[in-house]
Amino acid sequence: MSMLDRKLRRDLRALSTQALAVALVMACGLAMMIMTRSLILSLSTTRDEYYSGHRFAEVFARLKRAPQSVEAELAAIPGVAHVQTGIAVQVTLDVPGLAEPAVGLINSLPERGEQHLNRLHVRAGRLPEGRTSRGELAVGEAFAEAHGLRPGDTISALLNGAKETFRVSGIVLSPEFVFEAPPGAALPDNRTYGVFWMPYRELATAFQLYGAFNSVALTLAPGTSEGAVIAAVNRLLQPYGGRGAYGRIDHPSHRRLDDEIRILEGLAIAFPLVFLSVAAFMTNSVMSRQIALQREQIAMLKACGFSNRQIGAHYFKFSLGIVAAGVLLGAAGGIVLGGLLVDMYHLFFRFPSLEFRVDYGVLGLAAAVSAGAAFAGVAGAVRRAVRLPPAEAMRPEPPARYRPSLFERLGFARWSGPSLRMAFRNIQRRPVRSALTCLALALATGILIVPNSFRDGIAYVIDFQWDVIQRQTVTLSLVEPGPERALHDFHHLPGVVRAEPFRFVQVELKSGAIARRLLLQGLPAEGTLSRVIDAQSRQLRLPERGIIMSAKLAEVMRIQPGDTVFARVLEGRDREVAIPVVGLAEDFAGTAAYMEFRALNRLMLEGDRISGAHVVVEKARWAEFVAAVKETPRIGGCMIKDALRDGFRKTTAESIGLLQKIYAFFATIVAFGIIYNSARISLSERARELATLRVLGFTRGEVGAVLVGELVILTLVALPLGLVIGSVFAAGIITAVNTETVRLPLVLTPSNYAFAILVVAVASALSAVFAARKLAEIDLVSALKVAD
Amino acid sequence: MERIYGEGTAAVTALAGVDLDLFAGELIVLLGASGSGKSTLLNQLGGLDSPTSGVLRYRGRDLAGMDESGLTLFRRDAVGFVFQAYNLIPSLTARENVALITEICRDPMAPEEALAMVDLSDRLDHFPAQLSGGEQQRVAIARAIAKRPEVLLCDEPTGALDVHTGITVLEAIERINRELGTLAVIITHNAILADMADRVFTLSDGRIVHARENATRGAVRDLAW
């Protein structure tokens, strides 16, 4: 090891706490970068392997009914590689231990041979055999877990009006249902919605569909245009009640998974960027100070024949030491946290196995990025140091030029003692440095705002979604849309105090080249239970004509109120109508479009029909109500609001909550790191001057006030700035992670701001205490002798 | 040569025309009050600074016109500096401070040998903070001579030392000059040191105002101030 390297090692050791503070900030940024990028890698590679291993289809279609012979015609469409047809029907379930009815989607298994596409992964037990036994079905894992179902257990379902009991043959997973949620729902509710598989013959017979199919999945030959195949499939299936084919991008499970990856991508850039820029700034301030302290050493090295390059390299290595520690800590932190977080995804996404994979590529990138950040931070200081002619550097630095501060010139001096005056002059003497320290303190405040705005956003969504928008107790849906008089039957269920009808229709909305499939919700013009709310939290009245859509949907479809969208009805008669957009609604779970329900029925040309009703139930008669619902065969679904809210709290809220806690923890470390570092540097710069003051008879308290005063003044300026910066960060990051399926509102609460201020205040106070203690340790005589 | 700092009305003339020849093996003392220009002259001689005008040659090489990297090489290979403030690296031991320089030059002596020449063989592994002022200055001299320099430039080497310690330091410099044939230039405001020199120049206001040649060099231990 060369002598310069030996010096480096000892200098680093002497500066270890400060170097550690910088390394920790860097490590926080890197840990987040590595964690999120590795989660992205884990999710996307697991998904891709699952999709290809289990042959996930590329185009999907639903229809009313087509004879089996149509399958050959589908296979003959140019560009189609494989076709699989089958039956998928929605049924009402009676699950042991569950008071309310649940909804099941039963899919058929091929009559002969294996599944070509969307192959199942058997987790436990086996697939139903069909030919040798009857009354068996396979259950999707999410639902099975929610109810503790195991192979051999039984479950009852209402098949076309007849209640039948089935034995669970096995627990399975399907690439089609990685995200297992009811159609149109953004959130899983694994208690009341499940996916099942049964042999074709048994299922088809029960629904009088034998020899026919109502669902299609297909894959494409390489190089085929998906759009052309979808158009051909639609043409072919139209006479059979086709509801429009769609690609993976519109596949609900695939889309939700894609959105999750997109959220992570947003987080993988935004947070680390902020943290690493802070780390670069801290490296710069530590190195500038270190170089200032070693001014004479640098001059000696130059006088003795060391070249500028050698000296520059020495200080770069110094910062590289900090970077190495940061990268090591960051990589370890990122890998550990990523490993913990990946388990969280089991709550939403069902894969045969989701293993954590470290993105080693990003590890290298992270090291390069932080080395770059540190170099950028240190380059200026090194350049200044080597530019100084050695003869000049050998002399002690000339006394800095001070002058009365603006504060004094404004006439405040009368109220300030010499300590405060010195603090102000110090700030003003080095405006750029003071501004940068102030900015770093503001960043420390700002990054504390972001994670807590996530937390508050979730709390807001929970209130907004389930108190402001939805005020019903239960949403009951009919197996098939029925006449409006069915509403009376809902009214007559025990305990129902209020019932409002709704009509849901699957549509494809189109504007220009952009199309989206969704449930068009027909609601009473001014309903009191399921309401349409605008951005100002006012209820919107649904007009006689026209459609109101989620603001996010309008944004992605580039639509403004007053524009016209084309709605293609995907059930019943195939129609396409132009509807004016009359307003934008605020909502956070998925995207939706709303119409007055009679207007929607007019559009359907079906007379007044309802899909179900939102009802309010008396608490006292709840048990009676649930029992009655279970006995009503026409009721296919029953969504209990409180159960949904609980589900949301336990899954989405908890997972975002975990991320929020990790980020808040990191932000706190960064805040402490920045403030501690600032205090250390100003102590080091001031040591001689402060010792002089002590020698001249100032008390320890008065001297401390000079040092702490400066920090306090900068912190006071930084706090409001930090709150603004934090709000902007929060807005930016929330915009970056908002997708069509998951969104968070920007919520900034006083308690969020208060927390940020508190952390910064505590960090400042602790740093001040530390500085005061260091100050007490200064040996007055030696501080005056050597420049240190 | 001339050295002027700054421009226009703010211009300060540090060297106002100095003409001087120095030879190998000589021991030179530059005397002068503070501000007389002696440090500026030393900086020119050591390649730390370049004259504003005039000629500065070292063994036929033009130092005045040399660029930064040329001067760096000149300092590395030919010049040893001893500073008034010692300028040791506090985080390195005596031996390591010397080794720091021997690592970058062509034909250095071993750090232990250099330290032995200044009588510090028993202080090899002490850090600067553990050494007295005179010992620190002798480490600085060992560091300067370890590269076997052709020129040894000493800026107030005894400025911060008492008489007894100062004598030890000067003896070390004199010994190097005598045994290695190094040109040694000592700048000082202490006129007593003139006795140990071959030649003595007195500077004032950036000019040499007095030059004298000693027939015989006085013994260092006889100096007293």
Image (spheres, coloured by chain):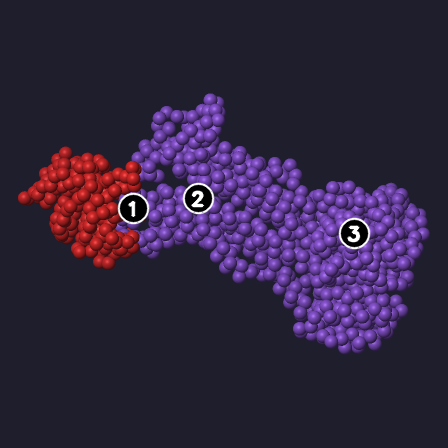
Disc 2 packing (10 Å; few <14; some 14–19; many ≥20): many
Chain that appears red: B
Residue type for callout 3: Val
Disc 1 packing (10 Å; few <14; some 14–19; many ≥20): many
Residue A581's disc is: 3
Which residue occupies the foreground of this view, A409 or A336?
Answer: A409
A743 vs A434: above or below: below
Q: Residue drawn at (17%, 55%), measured in percent from left and top? A: B59
Q: Residue furthest left?
A: B215
Mark 2 secondary-structure assignment: helix
Residue type for callout 1: Pro
In the image, taking residue B29 as reference, residue A622 lies left or right, namely right
- Which residue is label 2 attached to? A285
Q: Residue drawn at (14%, 49%), measured in percent from left and top? A: B22
Label 3 and label 2: CA atoms lie apart by 55 Å
- Which residue is label 1 attached to? A390
Q: Do tag 3 and tag 2 residues touch (Cβ < 8 Å)?
A: no
Q: Which quadrant is home to the N terminus of chain A? A: bottom left
Disc 3: which chain?
A
Label 1 and label 3: CA atoms lie apart by 74 Å
Chain A appears what colour? purple
In the image, taking residue B210 as reference, residue B126 lies left or right, namely right
B195 vs A91: above or below: above
Q: Residue drawn at (32%, 55%), measured in percent from left and top? A: A2
In the image, taking residue A596 as reference, residue B131 lies left or right, namely left
Mark 3 secondary-structure assignment: strand
Residue type for callout 2: Ser
Q: Residue drawn at (33%, 37%), measured in percent from left and top? A: A398
